[in-house]
Image: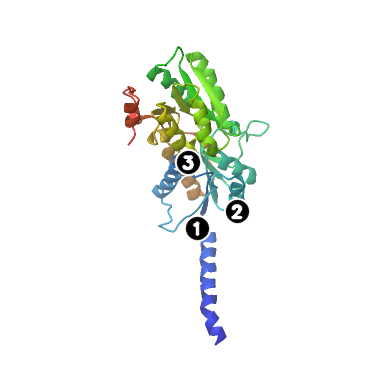
């Protein structure tokens, strides 16, 4: 009788183990790593998954398994996630934002990594002594040239309150792309006769205090640069700027949907989609032949109609209103 009672439990355990083994042995597993929770960044995952679907790979068809993990901004958690995926020997890693990409590169030299919302390898400081990127790194990257166009928009659209246009920025010293962007903008500002005031921000929890300190310096506009901390704290930054009637410009199209006035930058959804196309090719062939890191292809000039109206800013005709 005791055996009969435990028989259903044994059968259930066998079925689960069988399903798990089947998934592991026959269905490719994608380990998708997000460094933090963010409405704009999450569009990259949507694009990545859509690219797989349009190439025949979906969990609905049961011919792929996507294991999604979000580190919620915690570096120790991010490390644990990467370690888990590597030890589980997933078929490929999909990494969104720089922190995820760097963490994956540090932990595996064999599992293909398809990055998105990440810069060039040299800006991530992951190249070897000969300047070569890791051999298992693929996907889509971005350079800094587009920031010139994004920043140069501001003096064309905005008149200074004083003698010189003053633009405020927040940057994260620990993020290479943030520090690099600030350095590039400072050089560009000299050419444009624009004054830049930048304050460091190491945690999104400090966003309100740092933003208020910046706003007290009589700036004409706020520039939201490519910075994970700025992404995570954008609503806090936006609220503070709106209260002081300071418009926000950015290089990230996704932030325009969330309230910035205008941007020239990568479409985050398309960024993920472009990396997903590469991942789909790998899943079809099980080879990385012909795959390489690509520069993001789709950049948009976009504006937020409500924000432009609020600040009485006339947007050029070649800019598209976000929905």
Q: Nearer the viewer, mark 2 or mark 1?
A: 2
Q: Residue at coordinates 58% horizontally, 35% vertically from top-left?
A: 202
Is 29 located above or below residue 98 in the figure? below
2 and 1 marks in contact (CB < 8 Å): no
Q: How far apart are the two marked residues, 1 and 3, measured between alpha carbons?
A: 20 Å
Q: Which residue position is annotated with label 2?
A: 84
Q: Which residue is mark 1?
A: 27
Q: Nearer the viewer, residue 307 or 150?
A: 307
Badge 2 crowding class, 10 Å Cα cut-off, few under 14, some 14 to 19, many 20 or more, is few
Q: Quadrant of the C terminus?
A: top left
Label 1 element class: loop
Tell me the quadrant of the picture where the N terminus can be found. bottom right
Identify the mark nearer the N-term, 2 or 1.
1
Residue 191 x %, y %: 50, 14
- In the image, taking residue 181 as reference, residue 314 lies left or right, namely left
**Camera-side residue of 80 and 272:** 80
Residue 275 tag number: 3
Q: Element at badge 3?
A: helix
* Location of residue 12 in the rendering, given as x and y in whole percent from the top left corner: 51, 73
């Amino acid at each position: 009788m005791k055996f009969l009672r435990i028989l259903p439990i044994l059968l259930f355990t066998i079925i689960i183990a069988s399903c798990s083994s089947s998934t592991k042995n026959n269905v490719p597993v994608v380990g998708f790593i997000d460094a933090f929770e963010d409405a704009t960044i999450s569009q990259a995952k949507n694009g990545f998954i859509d690219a797989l679907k349009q190439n025949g790979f979906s969990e609905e068809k049961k011919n792929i398994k996507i294991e999604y993990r979000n580190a919620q901004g915690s570096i120790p958690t991010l490390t644990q996630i990467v370690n888990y995926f590597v030890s589980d020997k997933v078929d490929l890693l999909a990494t969104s934002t720089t922190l995820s990409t760097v963490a994956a590169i540090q932990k595996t030299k064999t599992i293909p990594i398809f990055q998105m919302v990440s810069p060039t390898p040299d800006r991530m400081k992951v190249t070897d002594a000969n300047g070569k990127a890791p051999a298992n790194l693929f996907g889509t990257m971005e350079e800094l040239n587009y920031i010139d166009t994004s920043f140069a928009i501001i003096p064309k659209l905005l008149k200074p309150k004083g003698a010189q246009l003053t633009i405020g920025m927040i940057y994260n010293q620990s993020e290479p792309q943030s520090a690099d962007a600030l350095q590039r903008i400072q050089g560009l500002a000299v050419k444009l006769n624009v004054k830049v005031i930048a304050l460091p921000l190491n945690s999104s929890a400090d966003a309100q205090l740092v933003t208020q300190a910046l706003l007290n310096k009589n700036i004409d506009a706020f520039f939201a640069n490519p910075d994970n901390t700025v992404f995570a704290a954008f609503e806090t930054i936006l609220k503070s700027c709106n209260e002081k009637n300071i418009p926000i410009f950015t290089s990230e199209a996704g932030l325009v949907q969330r309230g910035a006035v205008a941007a020239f930058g990568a479409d985050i959804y398309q960024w993920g989609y472009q990396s997903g196309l590469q991942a789909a090719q790998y899943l079809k062939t099980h080879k990385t032949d012909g795959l390489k890191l690509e520069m993001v292809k789709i950049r948009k000039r976009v504006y937020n109609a409500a924000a432009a109206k609020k600040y009485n800013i006339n947007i050029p005709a070649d800019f598209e209103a976000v929905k």
